[in-house]
Amino acid sequence: DAKTTQPPSMDCAEGRAANLPCNHSTISGNEYVYWYRQIHSQGPQYIIHGLKNNETNEMASLIITEDRKSSTLILPHATLRDTAVYYCIVRVSTVNTDKLIFGTGTRLQVFP
Amino acid sequence: KAGVTQTPRYLIKTRGQQVTLSCSPISGHRSVSWYQQTPGQGLQFLFEYFSETQRNKGNFPGRFSGRQFSNSRSEMNVSTLELGDSALYLCASSLTGSLLLGSEQYFGPGTRLTVT
């Protein structure tokens, strides 16, 4: 599984967009980029995933560069409840097995 | 639909004892994965069960084992507990356990195990 690199921490003002970067320069063609977040003392929560194209759902947008070596998770209007550790994961999956390899993540602090 | 449930939520054990943790997946989900989270090592994959069979395993000693029942509920067991086993143990369930079939992992709240 490819390794990911994320900044250890970021701050964001409430109401502004939070842009969380992730480098995955060794990603291969069949590996997806996944984002999860973990709010203190809770289990990780799925946010979004993508392979090549940019993706958007009700929580966030995922922008993947054309060479797929990096991506950015965008929370368009951050709220205090978005304060959490965000994990960028590159995930290999086959029909027989599937697992998540978590890195150290980015601790996002949203302030008033 | 109820989420993933884990019992107990908190547990205190003594070194040398053994412990069993339980996970009930989301109804209809057949894959259950277990993870260990510690401040030093972060979130680490333990193993995955699908249709009562372990089909993937992380790099943990044999003291860590698990099983899955026909109703997809899963248990993990840690024998001869060590101080370093103190951690948050997380269970995640998914429909098929395969991204290729469009399956996502949903996590439970975890069991916090303290070994003294």
Image (cartoon, rainbow, N blue to C red):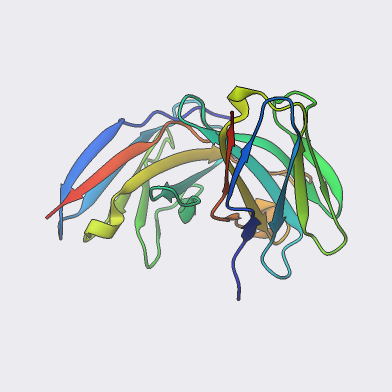
Q: Does residue B48 sit above or below A22 in this rendering?
A: below
Q: Position of residue A109 (x, y in %)?
A: 23, 45
Q: Is residue A63 left or right of residue A15?
A: right
State whether residue A78 appears in this view.
no
Q: Does residue A101 sit above or below A17 in this rendering?
A: above
Q: Does residue B84 sit above or below B69 in this rendering?
A: above
Q: Position of residue B65 (x, y in %)?
A: 79, 36
| Quadrant of image for the N terminus of chain B | bottom right
State whether residue B65 appears in this view.
yes
Residue at the image point whose x is 23% and y is 50% from the top: A18
Q: Nearer the viewer, residue B86 or A21?
A: B86
Which image quadrant for residue A17? bottom left
Q: Position of residue A38 (x, y in %)?
A: 42, 48
Residue at the image point whose x is 54% and y is 36% from the top: B37
| Quadrant of image for the C terminus of chain B | top right
Q: Nearer the viewer, residue A73 or A103?
A: A103
Q: Does residue B51 sit above or below B76 in this rendering?
A: below
Q: Position of residue A20 (x, y in %)?
A: 29, 42
Q: Is residue A84 left or right of residue A3?
A: left
Count of numbered tags:
0
Residue at the image point whose x is 46% and y is 52% from the top: A42
Residue at the image point whose x is 77% and y is 53% from the top: B74
Q: Is residue A106 left or right of residue B18?
A: left
